[in-house]
Image (cartoon, grey):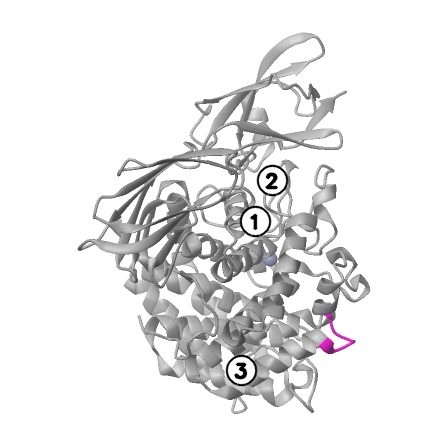
């Protein structure tokens, strides 16, 4: 591993821990392991890199004038593949990734271009978007290996973008699909290049992109809309300024630029937009949006909606929340990551981990959406999917100066370098809402440990090995500032009650971070059956009917004047996971009134 960052950030950043510093077990670790074993390590990286060779020989599809978005698949794959290969020390896989990097670099043209678009249609459609992902892919490789050639290739590709766009040249914000949002998301790797090279021209170019996003009246004007609190669904929908994946990608880049400049308006704007996403769009499973557009989904989630919760949107949302968590003191961003990860995200991955689905649903049958996209046996969500594990695990434990933050109750160990402490978490979370954190270090060390109390836990008891007992109502961090000895332990007992949520004439239940769902595998009646909104509902954690379910809960639900009867629920990610008619499921249950 090389130290890739040559420029110190302008603001205090809580550093997420690189994935290879964690050994993940438990539910989340096991799901990541099957994804590595049955999907990621088996992908043909050279095939994903092949569109960059096609621009001449296959003339960008022959029938189409412009190429399309196959140019994103390789870079997205690289984001997860490089850290996952490092995580599991798979040298053969790492070598194949390296060969694909060389294959991509071999397609670079003298002007720096790497892409799949014929010369006369360059800079149209998704060309700059693809360049973004290629740069990110090259920089992930550079960060892991220190291979200067990949850094140089990324610099030259950025040079190609800068030769077309910038002051006195073309605008990124006024061009391209989705009101310029797709183009402007190139901001993220531009800031990454500044950090890795210290070359001021990248920071200046990043500043120009932010200005273009902000002020260009033909662009998405995301700062103006955020300041006016315009609902996300109403931000230039006629120009597709509502495209959520692309808008959140721009926000990610704005936060990177904020990190370098400290301009508080940038952070405030993204916090405002992300708060709107959480309030207006995110549903009870941590998903949301329809056709990847902001649409006020939170309010319409009880209706039957297909083509919702696209996985690219979910992963981008989790990444953005992770960035916000590193730049603010607000643990609600960890609440959002937790909700999305354990529900809509894990639900999107097949049981054997070999593929990710593209769209989610809150009920019905989990059908598989597109497998092939852009005439390749690949698609955007499958390429993006494994990045969700990074978005969950890396911010799970953070450090800065003399402080450590535990943001997620993973089962496993994380080695923090500064302060030099191993954080060992032992639990069966989130099935069992108890966790212990044991710290080990070479010698007695003074530092602050901040443990997150999730917003869903109405009452949490924290007990320490040195005799403290703290009872906390609601979410936040509990902070311990002391001199630690190896073996010191903090134990957390979270609120295990099942909670009822009501929207209109429907209700849904959650326990801890898990959304619960009915599933016909319980064989206990019609999923559309209405029950009373009765406070006497009693829930008990039970054994699932078979091993395909992670967790089961039996609720005693009331109806008419009949005595309450048992109704089976499982965790949302298990619901419908046979992906056929054997496991129809329902999250929102009709209320009998
Ligand atoms: Zn997608």
Q: Is residue 419 magenta?
A: no
Disc 3 versus disc 1: distance between alpha carbons?
37 Å
Left or right, 182 with reference to 237: left
Q: Is mark 2 within 8 Å of ligand 1?
A: no
When the figure is inspected, residue 230 is found, relative to residue 548, above or below; the finding is below
Q: Residues within 10 Å of mark 1 (few under 14, many from 20)?
A: many
Residue 590 at what x, y percent from top left? 71, 26
Q: Which residue is identified by label 3?
A: 203
Q: Are marks 2 and 1 in contact (CB under 8 Å)?
A: yes
Which residue extends farthest left? 443
Q: Position of residue 120 (x, y in %)?
A: 68, 85
**Res 396 seen here:** yes
Residue ID for mark 1: 357
Q: Nearer the viewer, residue 566 or 447?
A: 447
Residue 60 seen in the figure: no
Relative to the observer, which residue lies in front, 394 or 243?
Answer: 394
Residue linked to disc 2:
366
> What count of labels does the image hold?
3
Q: Is residue 11 above or below residue 419?
A: below
* Mark in front: 3 vs 1: 3
């Amino acid at each position: 591993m090389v130290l890739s960052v040559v420029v110190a950030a302008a603001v205090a950043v809580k550093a997420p821990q690189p994935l290879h510093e964690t050994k993940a077990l438990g539910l989340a670790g096991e799901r990541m392991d099957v994804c590595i074993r049955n999907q990621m390590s088996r992908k043909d990286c050279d095939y994903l890199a092949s569109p960059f060779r096609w621009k001449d020989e296959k003339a960008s599809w022959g029938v189409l004038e412009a190429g399309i978005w196959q140019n994103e698949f390789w870079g997205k794959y690289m984001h997860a593949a490089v850290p996952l290969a490092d995580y599991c020390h798979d040298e053969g896989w790492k070598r194949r990734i390296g060969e694909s990097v060389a294959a991509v670099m071999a397609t670079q043209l003298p002007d720096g271009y790497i892409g799949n678009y014929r010369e006369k249609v360059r800079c149209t459609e998704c060309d700059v978007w693809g360049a973004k992902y290629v740069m990110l892919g090259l920089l992930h490789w550079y960060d892991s290996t220190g291979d200067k050639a990949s850094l140089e290739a990324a610099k030259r590709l950025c040079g190609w973008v800068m030769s077309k766009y910038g002051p006195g040249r073309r605008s990124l914000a006024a061009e391209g699909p989705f009101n310029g949002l797709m183009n402007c998301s190139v901001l993220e790797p531009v800031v990454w290049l500044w950090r890795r090279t210290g070359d001021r021209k990248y920071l200046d170019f990043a500043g120009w992109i932010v200005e273009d996003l902000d002020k260009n009246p033909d662009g998405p004007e995301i700062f103006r809309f955020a300041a006016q609190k315009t609902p996300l669904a109403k931000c230039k929908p006629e120009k597709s300024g509502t495209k959520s994946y692309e808008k959140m990608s721009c926000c990610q880049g704005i936060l990177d630029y904020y990190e370098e400049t400290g301009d508080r308006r940038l952070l405030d704007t993204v916090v405002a937009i992300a708060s709107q996403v959480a309030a207006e769009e995110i549903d009870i499973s941590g998903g949301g949006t329809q056709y990847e557009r902001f649409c006020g989904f939170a309010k319409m989630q009880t209706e039957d909606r297909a083509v919702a919760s696209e996985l690219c949107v979910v992963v981008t949302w989790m990444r953005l929340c992770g960035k916000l968590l590193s730049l603010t003191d607000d643990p609600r961003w960890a609440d959002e990551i937790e909700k999305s990860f354990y529900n809509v995200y894990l639900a999107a991955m097949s049981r054997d981990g070999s593929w990710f689905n593209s769209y989610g649903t809150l009920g019905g049958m989990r059908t598989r959406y597109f497998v092939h996209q852009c005439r390749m046996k690949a698609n955007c969500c499958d390429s993006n999917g494994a990045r969700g594990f990074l978005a969950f695990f890396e911010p799970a434990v953070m450090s800065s100066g003399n402080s450590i933050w535990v943001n997620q109750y993973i089962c496993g160990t994380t080695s923090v370098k500064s302060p030099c402490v191993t954080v060992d978490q032992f639990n069966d979370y989130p099935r069992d809402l108890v966790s212990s954190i044991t710290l080990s270090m070479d010698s007695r060390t003074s530092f602050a440990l901040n443990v997150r109390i999730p917003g869903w836990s109405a009452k949490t008891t924290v007990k320490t090995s040195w005799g403290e007992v703290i009872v906390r109502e609601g979410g936040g961090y509990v902070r311990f500032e002391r001199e630690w000895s190896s073996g010191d332990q903090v134990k957390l007992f979270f609120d295990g009650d099942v909670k009822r949520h009501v929207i209109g004439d429907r209700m849904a239940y959650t326990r801890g971070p898990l959304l619960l769902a009915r599933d016909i595998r319980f064989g206990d009646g019609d999923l559309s059956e209405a029950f009373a909104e009765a406070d006497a509902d009693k829930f008990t954690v039970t054994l699932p009917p078979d091993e395909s379910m992670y967790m089961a809960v039996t609720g005693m639900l009331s109806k008419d004047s009949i005595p309450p009867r048992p109704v089976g629920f499982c965790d949302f990610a298990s619901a419908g996971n046979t992906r056929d008619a054997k496991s129809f499921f329902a999250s929102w249950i009709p209320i009998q009134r």
